[in-house]
Amino acid sequence: EFGFSTTPLIAMGCIMMRKCHLNTCPVGIATQDPELRKKFTGTPEHVINFLFFIADEVREIMAKLGFRTIDEMIGRVDMLQQRKDVDHWKAKGIDLSSILKQPTVPLRIGRRCLIPQDHGLNEAIDYQLLEQTKIALEEKKPVEISVPIRNIHRTVGALLSGRIAKYYGAEGLPDSTIKINFTGSAGQSFGAFLSKGVTLTLEGDANDYVGKGLSGGKIIIFPPKNSTFVPEDNSIVGNVVLYGATSGEAYFAGKAGERFAVRNSGSTVVVESVGANGCEYMTNGTVVILGKTGKNFAAGMSGGYAFVLDEDGEFASKMCNKTMVDLDPLNEQDAKLLQTLIGNHAALTGSRRAKMILDGWNTYGSKFVKVFPHDYKRVLNAKEQKAKQEALNG
């Protein structure tokens, strides 16, 4: 395994300004500003050339050591030497001899991976889904199926979405062409990269990374109908939900873990409570939270909107990182959007909290806070002013 870290990025022009989260990258890599993006001059050939240089140097080092192949080097700890020029007070006393011990074993004992691992991918639940939704994939005819799920089933929906992308590209299928109703506990990355046209409904709960890279699909998760716990006080999905989602919708009738909607760049989601670092580095999309959040909400958030129900004022005073965002009251357009999304949430998940908020809108509506990034607000205002000026000049 080889890790090249940031060096291929540097080969394409990165100058390590460490401002990736501020949308001000001077070489046009980590930014959505069209003027800055014009400055990007990187090409695939730059990375290819860099890796050829690495390969040449590796061959030189291998020749000095007497190795012809990488495989010959694996396990040869006798060729490693501990550096003696380490002066750091913590590191200079470390003895690595036990780790660098060459075991005395016969030559028939392998020193590298010789037996391929079976990851059980041929048993992935998606193969079952592909077979059951075949008519939808081939003829775009609506299909609805019900399937039990366990937490050993990971990345459910990804293979299905890959097949849709192969047939129809980013356009996907018409909305809700494929509806899959699950019951049970989903494993990690449920609904990852879910394509447009697929709706996954789960009566139960799910692990981390739900909706990772969501790409136009819809995910609905609610507690079992016979459950007695209070949904907004109990986790229904894990950490880092909707990481890097680009489009689509999600409705979670319960609490999400930490780093909710990190790097969300276009999805619309309603959830009842979240942990720390919610909407971190978010660049677009709409997030509605019908309850409490953890600390450091909106850190590095440069685009999109978040609407948070701040019943006790604690969100504004303690939980939100206001470095890059304003906390604004709702305008009429915001209120209509919010009521629509909360109504969708109530209808799709049966959320009691959503119904309570809608029924008491005169009380709860004024307690919502709009989290509005400074730069996003500035760009929208500039567009609005330009449109008005053009209309006047018209």
Image: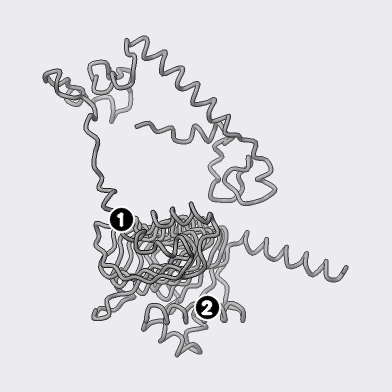
Circle 1 or circle 2, nearest the eye: 1
How is the model colour-coded? one colour
Distance between the alpha carbons at the discs numbered 1 and 2: 32 Å
Note whether 32 is above or below 173 in the view shown: above
* Relative vertical location of residue 143 with respect to residue 12 in this rendering, above or below: below
Residue 117 % position (x, y): 24, 39
The residue under the point 32% across, 62% down is 238
User: In this image, 339 relative to 388: left or right?
Assistant: left
- Helix, strand or loop at label 2? It is helix
Q: Residues within 10 Å of mark 1 (few under 14, many from 20)?
A: many
Q: In this view, does 303 lie above or below 269?
A: above
Q: In this view, does 233 lie to the left or right of 337?
A: left
Give the residue number, with chain letter if any, for mark 1.
Answer: 154
Front-most of residues 303 and 42: 42
- The front one of 288 and 310 is 288
The C terminus lies in quadrant: bottom right
Give the residue at x 28% y 59%.
187
Residue 290 got which mark?
none
In x, y percent, where is residue 185?
26, 65
Locate the N terminus and report the quarter of the image it occupies. Answer: top left
Left or right position of 188 against 384: left
The amino acid beneath tag 1 is Arg
Report the number of numbered marks.
2
Q: Which of 21 and 74 is in front in this view?
A: 74
Q: Residue at x 41, y 70 (%)?
A: 143
Instruction: Describe the element under mark 1 as helix, strand or loop.
Output: loop
- First in sequence, mark 1 or 2: give its number: 1
* Residue of label 2: 338
The amino acid type found where label 2 is placed reads Leu
Quarter location, residue 69: top left
Q: What residue appears at the point 29 percent right and 63 percent down from the top-left corner?
A: 186
Residue 298 pos. (x, y %): 49, 61
